[in-house]
Image: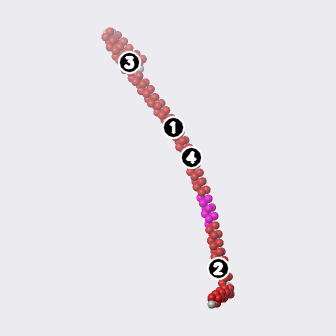
Amino acid sequence: MALDAEFWVAVAFVIFVGVLIYVRAHKTAIAALDARRERIEAELNDARRLKEEAQALLAQYQQKQREADAEAQAIIAGAKAEAERLTAETKVKMDDFLERRTKMAETKIAQAEAQAVADVRAAAAEAAVAAAETILRETVHGQVADDLVAKGVADLKSKLN
């Protein structure tokens, strides 16, 4: 009986395989596998294309970043040069300003000194005239003395001023 059961299992298997061949199940399975293979292949191609696009985009953005860095460095260098130029220009202007102010102060001081000297001379002249007038009045008397004093005072005033 063991042979009978194995025999019938073998016969049933052969019939099953024959039915599968008859209904062309293998072609349907192969077609399904081919369709799946094509779908997977298309997905892989899309993935490769997307990867290449992403790499190109990454390279493009890296290039833009390098350009932006270079531009930033150029802007910084320009700003430093401008700051140095402005510093030098400001220093020159400040030196000129200080020099003008110093000259103005020196001029004012010289004018004040000259005015002080003139004031002292005028005061000394007036004191000398008053002293001379007093001395002459005490030593010379009469009309001649008065004329002499008046003439001397006038001459002295004109010479000292």
Residue receiving disc 4:
77
Mark 3 → mark 1, Cα distance in angstroms: 50 Å
Looking at the rendered image, the disc whose residue lies closer to the viewer, 3 or 1, is 1
**Badge 4 element:** helix
Query: Residue sitting at 41 percent across and 22 percent down?
Result: 117
Mark 4 → mark 3, Cα distance in angstroms: 71 Å
Residue receiving disc 1:
91
Left or right of 38? Residue 119 is left
Q: Check the picture and name the quadrant holding the C terminus.
A: top left
Looking at the image, which is closer to me, 123 or 48?
48
Residue 18 in picture, x, y percent from top left: 68, 87
Residue 103 in picture, x, y percent from top left: 47, 30
- Please tell me how many numbered marks the rendered image carries: 4
66 shown above or below 134: below
- The region drawn magenta spans 50-61
The answer to which quarter of the image holds residue 111 is top left
Residue type at mark 2: give it.
Answer: Ala
Residue receiving disc 3:
125
Mark 3 → mark 2, Cα distance in angstroms: 135 Å
Mark 2: few/some/many CA within 10 Å (<14, 14-19, 20+): few
Residue type at mark 3: give it.
Answer: Ala
Mark 4 → mark 2, Cα distance in angstroms: 67 Å
